[in-house]
Amino acid sequence: MFSGRALLWIVAVAVLIALPPAVVALGQPFYIDLVRRIMILAIAAASLNLILGYGGLVSFGHAAYLAVGAYAVGILGFYGFTSGWLHLAVAVAASALVALAIGAVSIRTSGIYFIMITLAFSQMLFYLGISIEEFGGDDGMRIKTPSRFPLVDLADPVVFYYVALVLMLLSVFLVFRIVNSRFGMALRAAKSNEARTRAIGFSPYPYRLAAFVIAGAMCGLAGMLYANHTRYITPDLASWQQSGDLMFMVILGGMASTAGPVLGTFALLLVEELLKGWTQHWQVILGPLLVLSVIFFRRGLAGIFYKPDA
Amino acid sequence: MLEVRGLTKSFGALRACDGIDFDVVEGETHAVIGPNGAGKTTFISQLAGDLRPDSGSVRLDGADITALPAPKRARLGLARSFQITSVFPDFTALHNVALAVQARSGRTGFWRPARSDPALIDPARQILKDVGLENRINILAANLAHGEHRQLEVAMALATEPRLLLLDEPMAGMGIEESQRMIELLSRLKQTKTIILVEHDMDAVFRLADRISVLVYGRVIATDSPERIKLNEEVRRAYLGEEV
């Protein structure tokens, strides 16, 4: 079982490594851009999976951190700071802080209230972005120079592609280690049976809040990469549609599975791309497809490949 | 060891617990019996910290724990099992117990895999053996039989190394054979543990209890040895009826 799983990972990573030279040889370098975008959003989906899949926290505002990370790059660039390490540090720290503030309030609630509060906070950030004219308001802002790192040039599409690939794999691995650690077991226990968790001596709150902050920080990293990818950011990054997309990637791929968010992100965005090339009314087809996929793949796409962990 | 004074809890007009005084001495097995609706589960929930009393106090070893939430009480050594099965259905029996061991250890970590950690797994395996589930350790809790769930509940309570074990109807819904096994398990446990046992099964209560408190309409009407409780007129009238 394990070797089968490992084999799938090896094949998938090998394909992703081989993709840039292959598509260049085929004269379709556009695909480097597409897959890079998918991999960056897969980081965001992996971070959401930590709290949604493993923690049972249905955050409907996860895109907020994507926007915080992206605007960290935009605003620092606006004031002339181009150091990549600074961008990275500020994007991650700011998202973690925002997640701490949102989590501290919202995790005291549960169920529909939790969903609504996380949604409300992300909408607040969305309208904040629209209202600050200096940073472009709802027109958004252009990223004039990418985050500058020594030795690694994010302006080079292929280099950036491999950076995104490595960071995506690292993110997935990080979530994998966290959810199987003692911390992760307590987090999953609180999702499985909260009363029982409390009865054996765990307070779920600090575990959930810590997971919420880690997920926010990781999504902030995705936002920082996303800003470098599109070179143009708008408050739409924090919109509820974006949050819904992230949730869908996780659910489609398979909640509480290691590979799920990656599979879900690839599946959703590739199908979307395919349909867009086909017809202008691609959403009419995508919608029913998503409904069908949820009905037929209860445990998501990852459920096709292996059984859920105990 | 445990001192309860004047514990009162109302739900609207209903007084589920009406000034309960209750003591547990170290080492004893103290059974709480009473007809349905007498307030037994409400009482236990207040001892475990899942419900906050309207008035009255709960002291553990002299320290006032009336306002402490359940997780803190658990860490002080007060472990409970639930009347209605409450386990982690999507974890194996072994990892259910390992979680309780982890809660007791108070240590956490973000990196090392917990499911292969001998500091958690070895004690969990031993406890499952103690309660007679050694052949079921890798079964998902959702797939265990009812009686096995009850055993698992006790195992999880034990794994927190409690000083005081609160068992809320451990025999509920069990067949005769399962009940006998549970009684044997509890009679072994009572050698070393202090236990509060809420139970309907009179056979079990009279075999296990050192003292019995009878709860009727939210009041303790008698606390005495099993022999004297059997003879107590008021208790007979209120509760035991033809059963004795």
Image: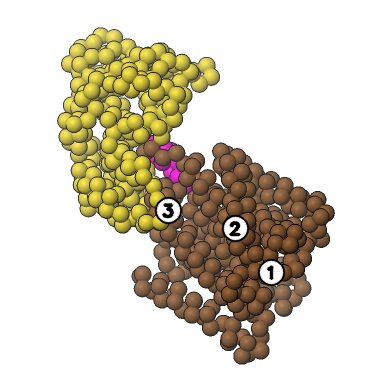
Chain colours: A brown, B yellow
Q: Which mark is residue A42?
A: none
| Badge 2 and badge 3 in a common chain | no
Q: Quadrant of residue B180?
A: top left
| Badge 3 and badge 1 in a common chain | no
Q: CA distance from mark 2 to mark 3?
A: 21 Å
Q: CA distance from mark 3 to mark 1?
A: 33 Å
- Residue A159 drawn in magenta: no
Secondary structure, magenta segment, majority class: helix
Image-based side of A98 in relation to B56, left or right: right
Badge 2 marks a residue whose secondary structure is helix
Label 3 chain ID: B
Q: How dense is the environment of label 1, judged by Cα within 10 Å: few (below 14), some, or many (20 and up)? A: many
Could you tell me which residue is drawn at 41 percent across and 35 percent down? B71
Badge 3 marks a residue whose secondary structure is loop
Estimate the x, y position of residue B156 in percent, counting from the top left: 31, 41
Q: Which mark is residue A89?
A: 2
Residue on which disc 3 sits: B110
| Camera-nearest residue between A120 and B131 | A120
- Residue A197 drawn in magenta: yes
Could you tell me which residue is drawn at 79 percent across and 57 percent down? A135
Q: CA distance from mark 1 to mark 2?
A: 15 Å
Vertical comparison of A47 with A207: above or below:
below
Residue on which disc 1 sits: A146
